[in-house]
Image: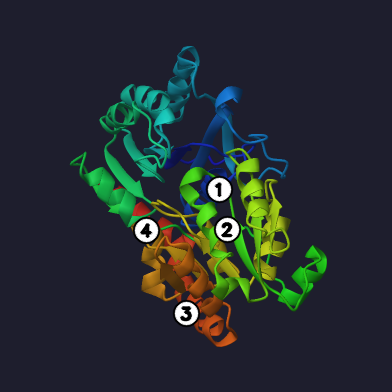
């Protein structure tokens, strides 16, 4: 245990919870440690009520990350237990408390705790999403309550930062979504496909991640009926837990006669699966209806796969800036044309080269250095 004063107490999902938020909490903590900071993660004992969580399980089966101080005690929706966390914060006396905020569901617990923290401790929000993709009537009220307790905001995208600055006049840092370092290394396409059982002669488009209505999977499926794409030996692999009724998509594929071209894997994808899928794919597609940023984009960068993304500000910005893929209208026929173009070897090679050039700009070390400097000025 580090006996120095605590620089950062970072509150949010971490091990044993699974998913992108938890993984990036670990990455952020490691990056701050590399800067010589004393860091502790404070995670939940209970996050979502079972009835509100649409996935199969909230907990990870992966080993606990090493060399990280972690406290597991926060109950997300039981106010009777929040006082314990306040006492923990007062005992630890961190210089900065960071609230990892990605849903208004967390506003009551975060806002109440932040309100009881003395002014001598900086209260910083690190925000993934501000306006939910699937809004509810209480979102604005909850966001206001949480935001009123915060000294400064930081984000993982410019789009989210733009949303926040319309509501609050406090210091704001518009960051970026860094590329993970704790992933398994890329494999050759041939080796990955051998393990996956994929045919080397086919082109494969990957749709990866949690499947929700706003992610526009139906647009991508419908694109495969377009004559431009239908005549090509291009296949679609869909991998990720479905937060809707799975039949919505399997029935659509069947009704369009695409069973031979589109396959589903509705399971949560661990690091080994991520390695195989991204190494084996030719292109990563994100035909979202709306987005503020995406955790899939950094995965595609890490495995150097060109991207096809919707013409949505939070999604297209890095793709356009880095020339790491193509941006298309949310129209199946346009998606089809650009997918065919993107899988061509010379086009793919151009975008892969651009991804390699962009990689250093998205490191966790670069993020942590700039973020820490911003907080020091608050």
> Which residue is drawn at the image coordinates 39% and 59% (left, top)?
369
Q: CA distance from mark 4 to mark 3?
A: 21 Å
**What residue would you read off at disc 1?**
20
Q: CA distance from mark 1 to mark 3?
A: 25 Å
Q: Earlier in the sequence, mark 2 or mark 4?
A: 2
Q: Nearer the viewer, mark 3 or mark 2?
A: 2
Q: CA distance from mark 3 to mark 2?
A: 28 Å
Q: Earlier in the sequence, mark 4 or mark 3?
A: 4
Disc 4 secondary structure class: loop
Q: Position of residue 22 (x, y in %)?
A: 56, 43
Q: CA distance from mark 1 to mark 4?
A: 21 Å
Q: Earlier in the sequence, mark 2 or mark 1?
A: 1
Q: CA distance from mark 2 to mark 4?
A: 19 Å
Q: Are marks 2 and 4 in contact (CB under 8 Å)?
A: no
Q: Nearer the viewer, mark 4 or mark 3?
A: 4
Q: Position of residue 261 (x, y in %)?
A: 69, 64
Looking at the image, can residue 260 be seen? Answer: yes
Q: CA distance from mark 2 to mark 1?
A: 25 Å
Q: Earlier in the sequence, mark 3 or mark 2?
A: 2
């Amino acid at each position: 245990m580090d006996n120095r004063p605590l620089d950062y107490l970072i509150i949010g999902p971490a091990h044993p919870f699974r998913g992108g938020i938890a993984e990036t909490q670990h990455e952020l903590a490691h990056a701050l440690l590399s800067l010589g900071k004393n860091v502790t993660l404070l995670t939940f004992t209970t996050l979502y009520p079972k009835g509100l969580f649409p996935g199969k399980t909230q907990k990870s089966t992966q080993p606990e990350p090493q060399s990280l101080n972690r406290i597991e005690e926060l109950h997300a929706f039981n106010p009777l237990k929040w006082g314990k966390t306040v006492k923990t914060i007062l005992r630890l006396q961190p210089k900065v408390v960071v609230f990892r905020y990605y849903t208004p569901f967390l506003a009551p617990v975060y806002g109440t705790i932040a309100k009881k923290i003395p002014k001598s401790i900086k209260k910083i929000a690190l925000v993934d999403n501000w306006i939910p993709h699937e809004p509810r009537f209480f979102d604005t009220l909850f966001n206001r309550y949480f935001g009123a307790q915060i000294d400064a905001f930081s984000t993982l995208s410019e789009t989210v930062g733009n949303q926040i600055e319309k509501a609050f006049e406090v210091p704001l840092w518009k960051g970026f979504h860094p590329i993970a370092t704790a992933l398994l290394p890329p494999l050759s396409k041939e080796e990955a496909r051998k393990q996956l059982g994929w045919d080397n002669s086919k082109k494969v488009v990957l749709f990866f991640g949690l499947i929700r209505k706003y992610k526009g999977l139906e647009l991508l499926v419908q694109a495969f009926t377009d004559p431009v794409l239908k005549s090509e030996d291009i296949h679609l692999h869909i991998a990720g837990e479905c937060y809707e009724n799975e039949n919505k998509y399997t029935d659509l594929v069947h009704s369009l006669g695409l069973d031979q071209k589109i396959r589903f894997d509705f399971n949560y994808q661990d690091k080994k699966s991520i390695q195989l899928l991204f190494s084996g794919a030719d292109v990563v597609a994100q035909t979202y209806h709306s987005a503020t940023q995406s955790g899939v984009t950094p995965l595609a960068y890490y495995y150097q796969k060109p991207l096809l993304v919707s013409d949505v500000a939070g999604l297209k910005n890095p793709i356009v800036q880095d020339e790491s893929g193509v941006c298309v209208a949310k129209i199946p026929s346009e998606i089809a044309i650009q997918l065919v173009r993107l899988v061509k070897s010379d086009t793919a090679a151009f975008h892969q080269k651009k991804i390699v050039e962009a990689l250093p700009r998205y490191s966790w070390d670069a993020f942590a250095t700039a973020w820490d400097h911003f907080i020091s000025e608050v």
